[in-house]
Amino acid sequence: MAIRVAVNGYGTIGKRVADAVAMQKDMKLIGVTSHSYSFNTEVAKQKGYKIFTLEDGAANELKNNGITPDGNFQSLLENVDVVVDATPRKIGKENIDKFYKANKIKAIVQGGEKHEAIGTSFVAQCNYNGALNKDFARVVSCNTTGLCRTLNALNKFDITSVHATMIRRGADPWDIYHGPINAIVPVLEMPSHHGPDVQTVLPNCQIFTTALSVPSTLMHLHSVIADVRKKVNVDDVIDVLNKTTRVRVVRNAEHLRSTAEIMEFARDLGRLRGDMPEICVWKEAIGTVSNGYNKLLYMQAVHQESDVVPENVDCIRALMGFKDGDKSIKMTNETFGIR
Ligand code: NAD
């Protein structure tokens, strides 16, 4: 029987997860929630998704705009096995306590929630089994997902410590409320919280991070320097990354020199919404140094709106007891067109 899934919080992440769930043969999207009427609700309706409202106020707002809700949140919860909660930060944890436990439903929350509040943090290719049969799990943030995917693979060279700087997009493309639009803003937290967050998935990774925000909406960029025990050369690194799922090595020869060109590439590939869920590592920005010590340096781009979406799909399977993580990743990848 198909896994019955609801998506609560139909915004940047939620609408993508809803589409991804609807594409899985072993899952059925029972419905999505609408917190308030917007173009997102219109598109959900056009896609034929059932729309459930959280409060009477929201239901009236929808009705005033010509959409009849299919029921309230409680009626949605009564018909699902698992909720993907993609509400703004802190609400996911509150919803676990308020709704999901009371209804005995499994739930996945997003990277805006704290690991300590949930207990299980998830990146499919790193720790799928850790979420097997759990009631609740947290799909980590876009930055943490990006760092975990590549560091987990490159640990083949015995990483002893990592320093990473995250150059973060100021806002998502649709977002007119956040910035900066003309400044570089350092995160005034040293080291930044991203390192400890990576350790919720890769507990043995000694990682120290710094972060800053820039006036861009197109992807984050990570500059990573790792100390490794094994002598390492660039070709070996490329080989490992080419064999790592959900990671793509991009090349100067393709004219993929920037986050802008990578996003254009994703659009040209015909990806839904022009998304690039793979972490893109620039071939020419991989370097190694062996001089009494072994260092590995690389830069990667992270599409903040989409890299966590396949993770949510795999996490649904893990919570529901689907044991074969590799098979789940393969099934999910096929629906996304990920090689
Ligand atoms: P968003 O603001 O784009 O979407 C949130 C949606 O939830 C909106 O549609 C909003 O109307 C709705 N909402 C608000 N309050 C609600 C409530 N009480 N109940 C139900 N719905 C409600 O947010 P987002 O960017 O999709 O972020 C969601 C989560 O995903 C956060 O934890 C965030 O940290 C995480 N995340 C975001 C990104 C990103 O780059 N946008 C990347 C990875 C993870």
Image (cartoon, grey):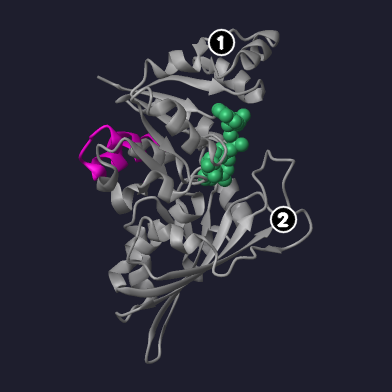
Labels 1 and 2: the sequence-earlier one: 1
Q: Determine whether the beta carbon of the residue marked 1 sits less than 8 angstroms from the nearest atom of ligand 1.
A: no
The label nearer to you, 1 versus 2, is 1
* Quarter of the figure that contains the N terminus: top left
Image location (x, y in percent) of residue 86: 51, 35
Q: Give the range drawn in magenta.
A: 316-339
Ligand 1 within 8 A of label 2's CB? no
Identify which residue is drawn at 53% across, 57% down. Answer: 301
Question: Dot 1: few (<14), some (14–19), or many (≥20) neighbours within 10 Å?
Answer: some
Give above or below for 209 relative to 258. Answer: below
Residue that extends furthest to the bottom in the rendered view of this protein: 292
> Viewed as shown, does residue 48 lie left or right of 214?
left
Indicate the position of residue 100 as horizontal and vertical percent values: 40, 27
| Residue on which disc 1 sits | 69
Q: Position of residue 125 (x, y in %)?
A: 32, 51
In the figure, 244 relative to 189: above or below? above
- Residue 3 vertical placement versus 59 (above, below): below
Kindly give the residue lying farthest to the left in the view shown.
323
Nearest the viewer among 284 and 11 is 11
Q: In the rendered structure, which amino acid carries the disc numbered 1?
A: Pro
Whether residue 274 is visible: no
Point 44% across, 26% down: residue:
99
Which residue is the extreme one toward the right? 182
Give the residue at mark 2: 215
Q: Going 64% across and 22% down the picture, which residue do you hit?
A: 36
What is the quadrant of residue 105 in the picture? top left
Numbered badge on residue 303: none
**Crowd tier of the residue under label 2, counting other residues whose Cα lies within 10 Å: few below 14, some 14–19, many 20 or above:** some
Q: Identity of the amino acid at label 2?
A: Pro
Is 180 displayed left or right of 333 in the figure?
A: right
